[in-house]
């Protein structure tokens, strides 16, 4: 930690310091320290603005919005998203923020983004086979349809992980604990892929919920303990953490 702080001090005011700040933010969010993560990203935003790079600044804000939305906070991410769009409203930024609006229940905005992506990137494999399926699954109310929406992502989803995570969430909503567990285990078995991605600790929680859904209390208890140990220093007011602690308490 001391080395990281020295690196941050050295990087202040230097070109590219935003990348270091972004990496530090990813490390913080991985451990549930979302306030710290957003703080680092806000510093990266300031660095980008100082270098007259609004698109980069918007990208950092989008990263902050996505991290906070992923853990159940629905108010702050929308504010961050609007700040990002005020800086840069290009397709790239709208794409980066679509997951935030999906989690906030703003289906209309997500559908507009999907239409925009289809228009501008009709032949882009990643957009067509990964991004759009994920967005469709996130706004689909029927979990069975959400799982179906994600089928195009299967061939290459290990490169991105989020389709697997969204499928796991859909199976949880569907009440299919065994299938959900399989999806979350795929992610946890590939921890070297985007190792600081927030999807890894959230998949640990997803696995706990999948075991609980199956009625396997012993495995659920262990999985919850692993998640809570990883997030032992997390911000205490994170909605998903509060829910996890309550769920774990009911298993005892």
Image: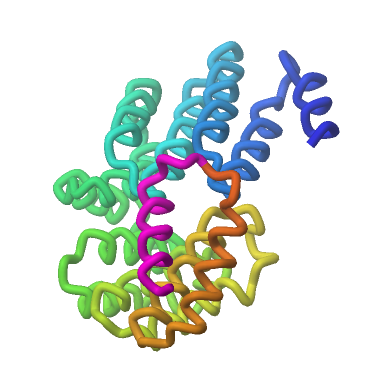
Q: How many marks?
A: 0
In this view, the residue in front, 180 or 50, is 180
Looking at the picture, how far across and down is residue 36, in whole percent?
56, 32
In this view, the residue in front, 140 or 191, is 191
Horizontally, residue 222 falls left or right of residue 117, namely right
Looking at the picture, how far across and down is residue 34, in whole percent?
50, 38
Q: Residue at x 35, y 23 (%)?
A: 83
Quadrant where the N terminus lies?
A: top right
Q: Is residue 77 above or below residue 146?
A: above
Quadrant where the C terminus lies?
A: bottom left
Q: Residue at x 30, y 72 (%)?
A: 170
Horizontally, residue 229 falls left or right of residue 124, namely right
Q: Quadrant of residue 122?
A: bottom left
Q: Quadrant of residue 93?
A: top left
Horizontally, residue 92 falls left or right of residue 75, namely right
Chief secondary structure of the magenta portion:
helix
- The chosen color scheme is rainbow
Q: Which residues are magenta?
A: 235-252
Q: Residue at x 38, y 53 (%)?
A: 240
In this view, the residue in front, 37 or 109, is 37
Looking at the picture, how far across and down is residue 126, in whole percent?
46, 62
In this view, the residue in front, 166 or 240, is 240
Magenta residue check for 110: no
Q: Is residue 189 above or below residue 42?
A: below
Q: Is residue 234 above or below residue 124?
A: above
Looking at the picture, how far across and down is residue 207, in whole percent?
47, 74
Q: Residue at x 66, y 31 (%)?
A: 21
Q: Quadrant of residue 15?
A: top right
């Amino acid at each position: 930690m001391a080395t990281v702080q020295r690196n941050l001090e050295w990087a202040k005011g230097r070109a590219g310091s935003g990348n270091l700040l972004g990496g530090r933010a990813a490390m913080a969010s991985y451990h549930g320290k979302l306030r710290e993560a957003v703080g680092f990203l806000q510093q990266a935003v300031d660095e980008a603005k100082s270098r007259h790079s609004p698109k980069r600044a918007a990208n950092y804000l989008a990263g902050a919005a996505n991290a906070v939305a992923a853990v159940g906070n629905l108010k702050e991410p929308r504010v961050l998203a609007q700040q990002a769009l005020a800086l840069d409203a290009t397709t790239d930024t709208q794409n980066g923020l679509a997951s935030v609006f999906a989690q906030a229940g703003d289906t209309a905005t997500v559908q507009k983004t999907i239409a925009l992506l289809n228009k501008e990137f009709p032949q882009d494999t990643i957009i067509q086979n990964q991004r759009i399926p994920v967005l469709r699954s996130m706004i689909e109310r029927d979990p069975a349809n959400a799982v179906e929406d994600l089928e195009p992502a299967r061939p290459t989803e290990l490169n991105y992980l989020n389709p697997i995570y969204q499928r796991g969430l859909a199976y949880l909503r569907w009440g299919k604990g065994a299938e959900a567990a399989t999806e979350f285990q795929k992610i946890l078995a590939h921890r070297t892929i985007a190792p600081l991605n927030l999807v890894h600790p959230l998949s640990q929680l997803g696995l706990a919920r999948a075991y609980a859904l199956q009625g396997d209390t012993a495995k659920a208890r262990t999985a919850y303990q692993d998640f809570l140990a990883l997030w032992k220093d997390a911000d205490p007011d994170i909605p998903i953490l509060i829910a996890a602690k309550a769920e774990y308490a009911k298993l005892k």
